[in-house]
Image: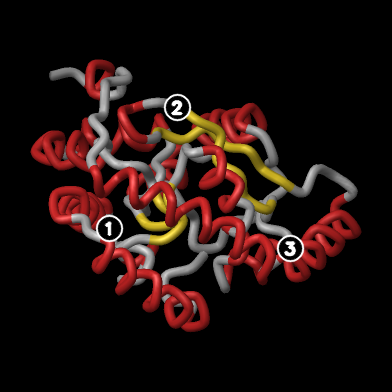
Amino acid sequence: MSNRKLLEPFTVNYTPYTIAKRLVDIIAAVVGILVFGVPMLLITGASWLESRRNVIFAQTRVGSGGKLFKMYKFASMTTRTDEEEREFLDRLGKENPKLLAEYRANNFKFKDDPRITHVGRFIRRFSVDELPQFLNVLEGDMSLVGPRAYKPDELEHQVKSHPELESDVRTLLTVKPGVTGLWQVSGRSEVDFPQRVKMDAVYARHQSLLEDLVIIFKTPLAMLGGKGAY
């Protein structure tokens, strides 16, 4: 099966669990927006004062069934659109291919990304840049708990590099990506792609409301600890 075939949309069946989870997601997203409303307004104001640019970054990600959607985050970098990010990476590939290779090998991240703003460094440290994803949950593209939402180019590159993981990737794409999940409470960026995919595939195969609750309760500690956040 080619990578292109892997990322083609496919049908995902609904179950009593997914219907119950959707109801929980809607309630949790509304509560989350109410609880974090003031911090979100403060982040919006601080980000605007620093950059005078759009404070929400809508980035293309791969969702359930291979469907592409726009995932919302507070902008934490100077590149704030898919096009700007592509231009940056294209330029990096020409000027410093070794650094681009390191970026890809490091889960498509830089440990000391030169694009990160002052406000961005703070909000990424505690993962509060993810708070706008409550809107994705309300729209139905994401769930409160689920696998990581991957960038299309990241998924294609990683599956090409790790073809043995194609079945696990296919499995994790049968569920909605989450605001939080197993990998987020297990080290985030310190967890490499093969480990992350296996975690997410295990979650997709054995998901339950009880497992979701355990992950939700672990999330605040992971956010405060900041392990693997950069």
- The residue at the point 62 percent across, 50 percent down is 73
Q: Secondary structure at mark 2?
A: strand
Q: Quadrant of the N terminus?
A: top left
Density class for disc 1 (Cα within 10 Å; few <14, some 14-19, many ≥20) is some
- The residue at the point 14 percent across, 49 percent down is 205
Residue 68's disc is 2
Nearer to us of marks 2 and 1 is 2
Q: Is residue 217 above or below residue 64?
A: below
Residue 192's disc is 1
**Whether label 2 touches label 1, CB < 8 Å:** no
Sooner in the amino-acid sequence: mark 2 or mark 1: 2
Three-letter code, disc 1: Asp
**Whether label 3 touches label 2, CB < 8 Å:** no
Image location (x, y in percent) of residue 122: 67, 71
- The answer to whether residue 61 is left or right of residue 36 is left
Three-letter code, disc 2: Leu
Sooner in the amino-acid sequence: mark 3 or mark 1: 3
Q: Secondary structure at mark 3?
A: helix
Q: Which color scheme did the rendering employ for the protein?
A: secondary structure
Q: Is residue 114 above or below residue 223?
A: above
**Whether label 3 touches label 1, CB < 8 Å:** no
Q: CA distance from mark 2 to mark 1?
A: 23 Å
- Residue that label 3 marks: 40
Near-viewer residue (34 or 104): 34
Image location (x, y in percent) of residue 13: 23, 30
Q: Secondary structure at mark 1?
A: loop
- The answer to whether residue 67 is left or right of residue 27 is left
- The residue at the point 22 percent across, 59 percent down is 208
Q: Quadrant of residue 185?
A: bottom left
Q: CA distance from mark 3 to mark 1?
A: 30 Å
Near-viewer residue (183 or 212): 212
- The residue at the point 39 percent across, 35 percent down is 63
